Amino acid sequence: FNRYLISKLFWILFLFIPILGLLLKLIYFRRDFYYPEHIFFALYQQGLFFLLSTLYNVVFDNQVIFVLVLILFAIHLILSMRNFYNQSWGKTLLKFGLVSFLGLIAFTLFFILALILVFVLM
C-alpha cells in the first residue's frame, strides 16, 4: 500500500493544483485575474517545490537543510505573491498566511480522498 501510494503521490500533488488555483482565486477575488492565471501561478510554485524537493532528496539528506529549503521556498512564495498580485507587504503576508492555512486544510482533505481512492483502486 505504501509503495503504491508513494508512486501516486506526484499525481496527487499535481491534481491538487486546480484546487490551489481556486483557493487563490477566492482569496484574491478583488484582483483582476482570471482563474487560469491563478492556476499558472500555482503550477509555477508547485514546480519549484518539486524541483527543490528533488534536489534535496538527491543531493542532501539532512533535516536541517530540509528546514532551510522550506524556509527559502516560503520566502520565495511571499516575494512571488507580492510581485504577481502587486499588493502591500501587510496584505501579502496576511494572504500568505491565509493561503498556507487554508491550503493545508484543503490538501489534507484532498489527500484523505486520494487515500480512499488509492485504497479502493488497489
Image (cartoon, helix red, strand yellow):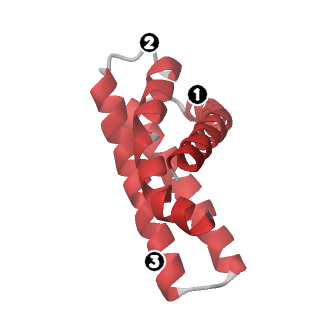
The N terminus sits in image quarter:
bottom right
> Of all residues shown, which one is farthest toward the top?
30
Q: Which residue is mark 1?
A: 91
Disc 3 is placed on an element classified as helix
Disc 2 is placed on an element classified as loop
Q: Is residue 49 visible?
A: no
- Across and down, in percent, residue 8 comes to 47, 57
Q: Is residue 63 above or below residue 32?
A: below
Q: Nearer the viewer, residue 8 or 88?
A: 8
Q: Nearer the viewer, residue 52 or 19?
A: 19
Q: Amino acid at mark 2?
A: Arg
- Across and down, in percent, residue 63 comes to 71, 78
Q: Amino acid at mark 1?
A: Lys
- Across and down, in percent, residue 97 comes to 66, 36
Mark in front: 3 vs 1 = 3
The structure residue drawn at horizontal position 65% and vertical position 41%, both measured from the top left corner, is: 112
C-alpha distance separating marks 3 and 1: 32 Å
Pointers 3 and 1 in contact (C-beta within 8 Å): no
Q: Which residue is mark 3?
A: 55
Q: Nearer the viewer, residue 122 or 36?
A: 122
Q: Residues within 10 Å of mark 1 (few under 14, many from 20)?
A: few
Image quadrant where residue 75 sits: bottom right
The structure residue drawn at horizontal position 33% and vertical position 23%, both measured from the top left corner, is: 35
Q: Is residue 65 above or below residue 53?
A: below
Mark in front: 2 vs 3 = 3
The structure residue drawn at horizontal position 58% and vertical position 37%, both measured from the top left corner, is: 110
Disc 1 is placed on an element classified as helix
Pointers 2 and 3 in contact (C-beta within 8 Å): no
Q: Which residue is mark 2?
A: 30
